[in-house]
Amino acid sequence: MPALILLIESDPVQAAAIMRAAADQGLAWQLTHVPTLAQARRLPGLGKADAVLVSYQLRDGVAFDLWPEVAEQAVLLTIDHGEEWAAARALQCGYADYLVKDAGQAYLHTLARGSRRRGTRYRPRAS
């Protein structure tokens, strides 16, 4: 059974790259993509995802705006270079980890390693 992953990313190029990388790496993920916080909040299964992969900067706010709704899940923050302060704050808040987006998209190669390292946090929840 694939892990349910909510991807919140406003940049369609980045979102497509993440989805492609997950498929290419053979990750057992069922990805749901939304580009805004508002759309994420409207999802009926927002609190049911095994993990949330969220970009810090979104069109309608920042990742921290959604924290109260996803705090019980494994949340990974994606940041741009220069936003390391946001990663530090995220870790203090309880985010599982962060990824720094790079121009060559090398950060995408860490998806598989990161999901394996975090172990059970990415396995589907028992029904």
Image (cartoon, rainbow, N blue to C red):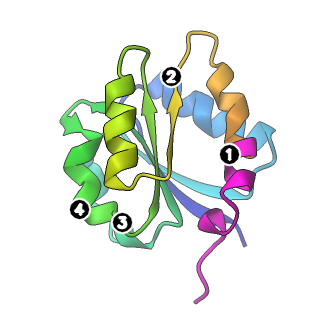
- CA neighbours of label 3 inside 10 A, class few (<14), some (14 to 19), many (20+): some
Taking the image as shown, residue 34 lies to the left or right of residue 115, namely left
- CA neighbours of label 2 inside 10 A, class few (<14), some (14 to 19), many (20+): few
Q: Classify mark 4: helix, strand or loop.
A: helix
Q: Please state the extent of the stretch shown in magenta in the rendering.
A: 113-127
Which mark, by number, is residue 46? 3
Mark 4 to mark 3: distance in Å? 11 Å
Question: CB of mark 3 within 8 Å of CB of mark 1?
Answer: no
Q: Amino acid at mark 2?
A: Val
Mark 1 to mark 4: distance in Å? 24 Å
Q: Classify mark 1: helix, strand or loop.
A: helix
Q: How would you classify the magenta stretch by its main secondary structure?
A: helix
Of circles 1 and 2, the one toward us is: 1
Q: Which residue is identified by label 2? A: 13
The relative height of residue 78 versus residue 38 in the rendered view (above or below) is: above
Question: CB of mark 4 within 8 Å of CB of mark 3?
Answer: no
Q: Which residue is identified by label 1? A: 114
The first of marks 1 and 2 along the sequence is 2
Which mark, by number, is residue 43? none
Of circles 4 and 3, the one toward us is: 4
Looking at the picture, tell me which residue is in the foreground, 24 or 87: 87
Which mark, by number, is residue 68? 4
